[in-house]
Amino acid sequence: MDAELIRRDLKLYLNDNKKYQKLIVQIRKGKRLLYWHEKLLSEFSRKPSGYNLEYKDLSLALQICEIHEVELETGNTKVFKGCIDIWHDDFDTFIENYPNYLPSVINGLSESQGGVVKIQFCPECNRLFKESKNV
Ligand SMILES: [Zn+2]
């Protein structure tokens, strides 16, 4: 099944970018779907020109950044124990602009500390985040 086609048709079907973004995050993070998500996906799957989509098809198609709509990549991040300074005055703006950047380190479980974990990230969020730090 063509993931790009599914995304394009779903976005057109929703006709509301905020709803589309929320649905992407909900599905990508494997969270339980809300009632309106289930209803909408059921209707989308049944539409005449539609797909006979299963949740896993949709989940695979929506492994994208909700802001930049590019497919996520997998990167390595070091795990440490401790606190990270918040380097932005406005953390909400930071999260809105680069929700899927690849952090260089994360605070992790003791058994992972000192090691490396794989994290999905958006290459565009990462690029823009790095650019913003150089300003
Ligand atoms: Zn992004």
Image (tube, grey):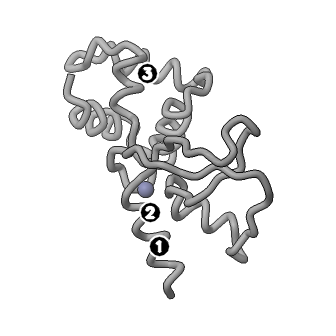
* Circles 1, 2 touching at the beta carbon (< 8 Å): yes
Quadrant housing the N terminus: top left
Looking at the image, residue 18 lies above or below residue 132:
above
Total tally of numbered discs in the picture: 3
- Whole-angstrom CA distance, mark 2 to mark 3, is 30 Å
In the image, residue 23 above or below residue 97? above
Q: Tell me the quadrant of ligand 1.
A: bottom left
Residue type, mark 3 in image = Leu
Task: Decide which of tag 3 and tag 1 comes sooner along the chain.
Answer: 3
- Label 1: few (<14), some (14–19) or many (≥20) C-alpha neighbours in 10 Å: some
Question: What amino acid is found at the position of numbered circle 2 in the picture?
Answer: Asn
Residue 127 to residue 66: above or below:
below
> In the orientation shown, which residue stands out farthest toward the front?
114
Residue 29, numbered label: none
The local secondary structure at tag 2 comes to helix
Mark 3 highlights which residue? Answer: 41
Residue located 79% across and 60% down the image: 83
Within 10 angstroms of label 3, few (less than 14), some, or many (20 or more) residues?
many
Q: Give coordinates of residue 44: x percent, y percent.
A: 36, 22
- Please give the label number shown on residue 130: 1
Residue topped by disc 2: 126
Q: Residue at x 49, y 41 (%)?
A: 118
Give 23 or 110, whichever is nearer the viewer.
Answer: 110
**Label 2 near ligand 1 (CB < 8 Å):** yes
Q: Nearer the viewer, residue 113 or 18?
A: 113
- Position of 74 relative to 48 (above/below): below
Point out the frontmost of discs 3 and 1: 1
Q: Position of residue 94 (x, y in %)?
A: 61, 67
Check disc 2: other Cα within 10 Å, few if <14, some if 14-19, many if 20+.
some
Task: For marks 3 and 1, give the CA distance.
Answer: 36 Å
Q: Is residue 112 left or right of residue 2?
A: right
Point out residue 117 in the picture as x, y percentages from the top left corner.
55, 42
